[in-house]
Every structure is written in C-alpha cells, then in structure tokens.
Amino acid sequence: MAHPKRKISKQRARTRRTHYKAVAPTLAICPNCGAAHIYHTVCGECGYYRGKLAIEKLAAV
C-alpha cells in the first residue's frame, strides 16, 4: 500500500474537506392542508400525496 512521503498539512486537508457539508432538504407546501413537507413524500399532517389520500391517520384513543 502506498504511503505519503510528506505530512499533509492541516490547512491542505481542511481545504479539501470544506466541500463536505449537509444541505437542507427542499420543502413543498401541501395543497390540501398547507403544511410544509419534503418533496416526493407523503404529507405528515394530512396523509395526502399528489392530491390523493395515501395514508389514513388513526384517531387517538
């Protein structure tokens, strides 16, 4: 296995790693209830996806 000939400096390593970052997911507004949800997922508030009921919510007993 290859070994580095010289030590990589902290600045050089950190400069390379600056591109690794988390991105916030894109949110959409549900046309049925108006809640924000992640694109291409069922709305957590009402259970609708693309204008159709996808999940029926159970009433709390």
Image (cartoon, helix red, strand yellow):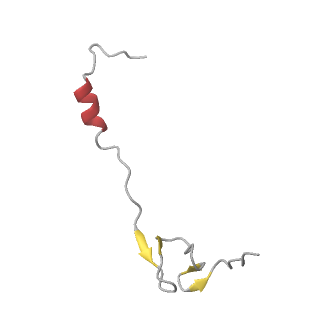
Residue 23 location (% of width, % of height): 37, 55
Q: What residue is rendered at 27% in x and 21% in y? A: 8
Total marks placed: 0
Q: What residue is rendered at 53% in x and 70% in y? A: 41
Considering only vertical position in the picture, is 46 above or below 18?
below
Q: Nearer the viewer, residue 61 or 45?
A: 61
User: Is 36 displayed left or right of 13 in the figure?
Assistant: right
Task: Check the picture and name the quadrant holding the C terminus.
Answer: bottom right
Task: Check the picture and name the quadrant holding the N terminus.
Answer: top left
Considering only vertical position in the picture, is 50 above or below 7?
below
Q: What residue is rendered at 28% in x and 29% in y? A: 13
User: Is 17 displayed left or right of 37 in the figure?
Assistant: left
Residue 42 location (% of width, % of height): 56, 73
Q: What residue is rendered at 26% in x and 25% in y? A: 10
Q: Residue furthest top?
A: 5
Q: Picture quarter containing residue 60? A: bottom right
Considering only vertical position in the picture, is 30 above or below 18?
below
Residue 4 location (% of width, % of height): 32, 16
Q: Residue furthest front?
A: 61
Q: Residue furthest right?
A: 61
